[in-house]
Amino acid sequence: MNMLTAYAPHAARILLGLMFFVFGLNGFFHFLPQPAPEGAAAQFMGGLAAAPYFFPMLKGAELLIGLALLGNRFVPLALTILAPISVNIIAYNFFMSPSGIGISLFLAVLQIYLMWSYREAYKGTLAVRVQLNTTEQQTAPKTAHA
């Protein structure tokens, strides 16, 4: 394994984590100026802002996901929670604010690469059929059949 393949997942994880950590913090402290959306994008953002819980929940999730990725803790779970957020970011930029499509596609590439890198962790969730292990099945005494 060469240096690039050895360190690429770590670099992607740190970069993605840093981006979501910073953007999550920005949702609370507004230290990065953002241009006001126009047209349909403004209507969409206004609709989301009308629900007072939405942006604090979204930015809180981004902050926690960023921390998990930066800390190398619960990475497959963080990537799973991040998936619908990423899909919405891409859809928003594709349909309503095309100027931001580049960064959203970059985030998606990093996330897909990381999910591929952690694919072993997803094997159980991608199984077509899974045997349910209930407590009763695990603790039931085995009987011999004659």
Image: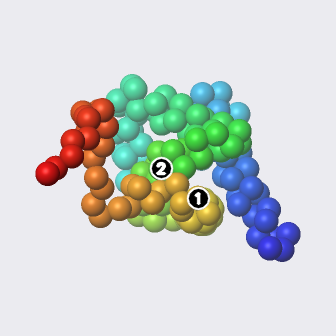
Q: x and y percent of residue 72 in the render? A: 69, 43
The residue carrying mark 1 is 118
Residue sitting at the far bottom? 2
Going by the numbered disc 2, the residue's amino acid type is: Thr
Residue 7's label in the rendered image is: none
Left/right of residue 79 with respect to residue 145 in the rendered view:
right
Please identify, in this view, whether the residue under mark 1 or under mark 2 is nearer the observer.
Answer: 1
- Residue 11, image x, y percentages: 76, 57
Q: Is residue 23 above or below residue 136?
A: below
Q: Is residue 50 left or right of residue 13?
A: left
Report whether 86 appears left or right of 13.
left
Residue 126 visible in the displayed image? yes
Asked if the residue at tag 2 contacts the one at tag 1, i.e. Cβ–Cβ closer than 8 Å, the answer is no
- Looking at this view, name the residue that lies furthest to the right: 3
Residue type at mark 1 is: Tyr
Residue 37 lies left or right of residue 30; in this view the side is: left
| Residue wearing tag 2 | 80
Q: Quadrant of residue 31?
A: top right
Give the SS element for disc 1: loop
Dot 1: within a 10 Å radius of its alpha carbon, few (fewer than 14), some, or many (20 or more) residues? Answer: some
Residue pictured at 31% horizontal, 37% vertical: 138
Of the pair 129 and 74, the residue shown nearer to us: 129
Q: For this rendering, which residue is in front, 77 or 100?
A: 77
Where is residue 65 drawn, in percent x and y? 58, 40
Which residue is pictured at 39% across the width and 25% down the height?
A: 52
Say if 118 sits above or below 56 in the image: below
Disc 2: CA contacts within 10 A as few (<14), some (14-19) or many (>=20) = some
Task: Identify which residue is drawn at 27% across, 47% down.
Answer: 132
Residue name at image x 54 percent, y 49 percent? 76
| View extreme (front): residue | 146
